[in-house]
Image: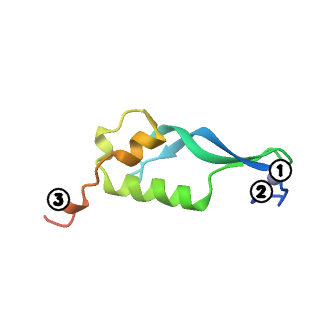
Amino acid sequence: MNCMWCESEKAKETKNSVYWELPDGTRAIEIQDTPSVKCEECGMEYQEESIINEIEDQLMLIDTKKLAKTIQYKELMEIPRLLKHNYFRF
Ligand SMILES: [Zn+2]
């Protein structure tokens, strides 16, 4: 795959811990084993947009107050979303 920054072909898929600010801005959590891309050419390590969107969506739709400070990416994605229960009901 090609690096998003320098377009080198030496970018590889990897997994990495990232710090993510919650949508309500109250705190940041560490998400471990997040699918990432690492470029051997320029040294950049980043998440692809699809992954960023998935994390953002998930954090919007789950009860983030119950989240621990550190979580695995897979665990985070498996948390049931609130949407079907009472997200739009007041
Ligand atoms: Zn690069």
Residue at 45% in and 42% down: 74
Question: CB of mark 1 within 8 Å of CB of mark 2?
Answer: yes
- Quadrant showing the N terminus: bottom right
Q: Quadrant of residue 4?
A: bottom right
66 or 15, nearer to the observer: 15
Element at label 3: helix
Say left or right for 78 vs 51. Answer: left
Count neighbours of disc 3 (C-alpha within 10 A) and say few if under 14, some if 14 to 19, many if 20 or more: few
- Any atom of ligand 1 within 8 Å of the CB at mark 2? yes
Count neighbours of disc 1 (C-alpha within 10 A) and say few if under 14, some if 14 to 19, many if 20 or more: some
Element at label 1: loop
Q: Which residue is mark 1?
A: 10
Say left or right for 10 vs 27. Answer: right
Say left or right for 72 vs 33. Answer: left
- Residue 5 pos. (x, y %): 78, 58
- Any atom of ligand 1 within 8 Å of the CB at mark 1? yes
Q: Which residue is mark 3?
A: 85
Please tell me whether mark 1 or mark 2 is closer to you in this view. 1
Residue at 14% in and 65% down: 89
Can residue 26 be seen in the rendering of this structure?
Answer: no
- Residue 62 pos. (x, y %): 31, 51
Element at label 2: loop
- Disc 1 residue type (three-letter): Lys
In space, the residues marked 3 and 2 are separated at their CA atoms by: 40 Å
Q: Which residue is mark 2?
A: 3
